[in-house]
Amino acid sequence: MTFVKTKLELEKLIAGDTLEVLLCEGEPLSNVPKTAIEQGFTVVENVHVKDNVHKLVIQKREGSPA
Amino acid sequence: MSLRADQIERYSRHILLQDIGGKGQEKLLAGRVLIIGAGGLGAPIALYLGAAGVGTLGIADADMVDVTNLQRQVIHFTPDIGKPKVVSAAEKVRAINPDVTVHPHQEWISAENIAGFIADYDFIIDGTDNFATKFLINDACVLGNKPYSHGGILRFDGQTLTVKPHESACYRCIFSAPPPKDAIPTCSEAGVIGVLPGVIGTIQATEAIKYLLGIGDLLTGRLLTYNATSLTFREIRIQRNPKCPVCGSQPTLTELKDNSDALNVCELETT
């Protein structure tokens, strides 16, 4: 469900905007960046924040899904 | 419109798809589809469109559930025998998805009432087994400029075509008039394999979803035929017919009328 919720937020952005997502390690961290790239978004940052939490910054670009 | 938390979960597999997403799901929830016939074809159509979250479904049929229906009309269950088909179908759709508003119309479609029915919907689906109604649906959709999906089944064969009036070939572009009464055997005479409406009806439901989403290529200008015994699909290219009596350059059919001579109906004859 993490990417589903991420995608709904990405749809609200315009090209060039970025979305910051905090992810737990494990399935979300393995799936969300991969699926975002597959669907035409750009992952501009993926850093460990604390404990098992990572911060992902995803950019919507021209031609990304509406 | 924004999706509720429970809708995000329910439709998550749609939202994940690049061509649908949240915005596409909102289009489906705002969509209105009329299914004419709650029999073999109408069953999978109503179930899949309901599950997909098409927000408003009209279901028109005057018939009652009969035990001979249950071999293929999978929306009706044994305890539904004797119940109006539209009531049985509406119960199942609501049980699958309470998001869907179902309008059951327990009436036979006729030249008198069809224009009023189709006016309220974005896309119409022909799930009838009756040449008279098939031609009437075509004519009403062309005259009312409503996109629709034609479907037909008999024995092991099925066919389907999507019509965008005045843009693509309509049913009368191929078949200018219904066959004479008794020229074609009915399902009750000739039989029909129970899984066949599942294949054709599911394609028709797919067309409705694509139309509402505005994605992909509709089955326009192509009559898709299917034979279950050889498991073959065939696509026959069809073009608009300039001499078509309803959408040609000089149409002769400008108002709706019932074709009682062509009445050749599975469900009607079994009641």
Image: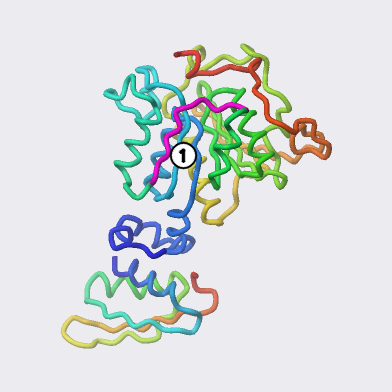
- Residue at image coords 35%, 17%: B67
Query: Which contiguous range is marked in magenta?
Result: B101-111
**Furthest residue toward right:** B250
Does the magenta run of residues contain A47?
no
**Of the pair B153 and B137, the residue shown nearer to us:** B137
Instruction: Give me the residue at 58% from left, 26% from top.
Output: B110
Image mark 1: chain: B
In the image, taking residue B11 as reference, residue B152 lies left or right, namely right
Residue B158, located in which quarter of the rendered image? top right
Label 1, secondary structure: give it: strand
Toward the left, the furthest residue is: A51
The residue singled out by tag 1 in the image is B58
Number of other residues with Cα within 10 Å of mark 1, as a class: few under 14, some 14 to 19, many 20 or more: many
Give the colouring mode of the picture.
Answer: rainbow
Of the 4 image quadrants, the one containing the C terminus of chain B is top left
In the rendered image of this protein, does residue A23 appear above or below residue B123?
below
Q: Position of residue B98 (x, y in %)?
A: 31, 47
Q: Nearer the viewer, residue A25 or B24?
A: B24
* B105 inside magenta stretch: yes
Query: Which residue is depicted at the point 34% across and 30% down?
Result: B88
Q: Quadrant of the N terminus of chain B?
A: bottom left
> Label 1 is placed on what type of residue?
Gly
Q: Does residue B94 sit above or below A59 in this rendering?
A: above
Question: Can you give x and y, in whole percent of width and height, for residue B208 in the image?
Answer: 52, 46
Q: How many marks?
A: 1
